[in-house]
Image (cartoon, rainbow, N blue to C red):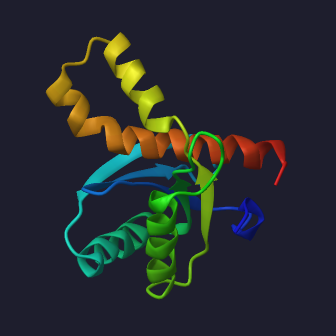
Amino acid sequence: MDLSALPPTGKLLGLDLGTKTIGVAISDGMRYSATPLETIKRTKFTQDAARLIELIAENDAVGFVLGLPLNMDGSEGPRVQSTRAFARNLAQKTDLPIVFWDERLSTSAVTRTLIEADVRRDKRAEVVDKLAASYILQGALERLRRGAL
């Protein structure tokens, strides 16, 4: 789905899907900024999805922006297939639209910023996923604001 599938207003949740964690970020209602929200330790899909559904309710979110881990050449590998499968399964649990956003380099950009800020490795590990989700969501918000769907 492209960004036009999202409702025109309301808070969005950004997701950075990893094999061990899910980074979660949220936009403000006006969709100007993305803020890191939390990092979910992945267990079983049912439990992961239940936490996401709770976050929808707690934050009155109206849609998801899910980072799509394309290869550097733009091709789709196993991680993209896994992300698309996660989205299909999540779509069975909620009626909210789920759109994909190219997340190439998001984690490395966030990690580089944290290193430049002299954040210790153990602290970086705690925050990198939710910051990557914020980075992904911010990119989508900027595209939405420019109106280039």
Foreground: 24 or 90? 90
Q: Residue at x 72, y 60 (%)?
A: 3
Q: Residue at x 84, y 49 (%)?
A: 147
What quarter of the picture does the C terminus occupy?
A: bottom right
Give residue 71's position: percent from left, percent from top: 56, 46
Q: Is residue 32 visible?
A: no
Q: Residue at x 73, y 70 (%)?
A: 5
Give residue 119's position: percent from left, percent from top: 25, 18
Foreground: 84 or 78? 78
Q: Is residue 51 visible?
A: yes
What quarter of the picture does the N terminus occupy?
A: bottom right
Using residue 106 as the reference point, say whether residue 147 is left or right of it. Answer: right
Foreground: 37 or 42? 42
Using residue 98 as the reference point, say whether residue 109 is left or right of it. Answer: left
Give residue 12's position: percent from left, percent from top: 55, 59
The correct choice, above or below, for 131 with respect to 39 in the image is: above
Residue found farthest to the bottom: 92
Q: Residue at x 84, y 48 (%)?
A: 148
Q: Can you tell which quarter of the image residue 97 is in?
A: bottom right
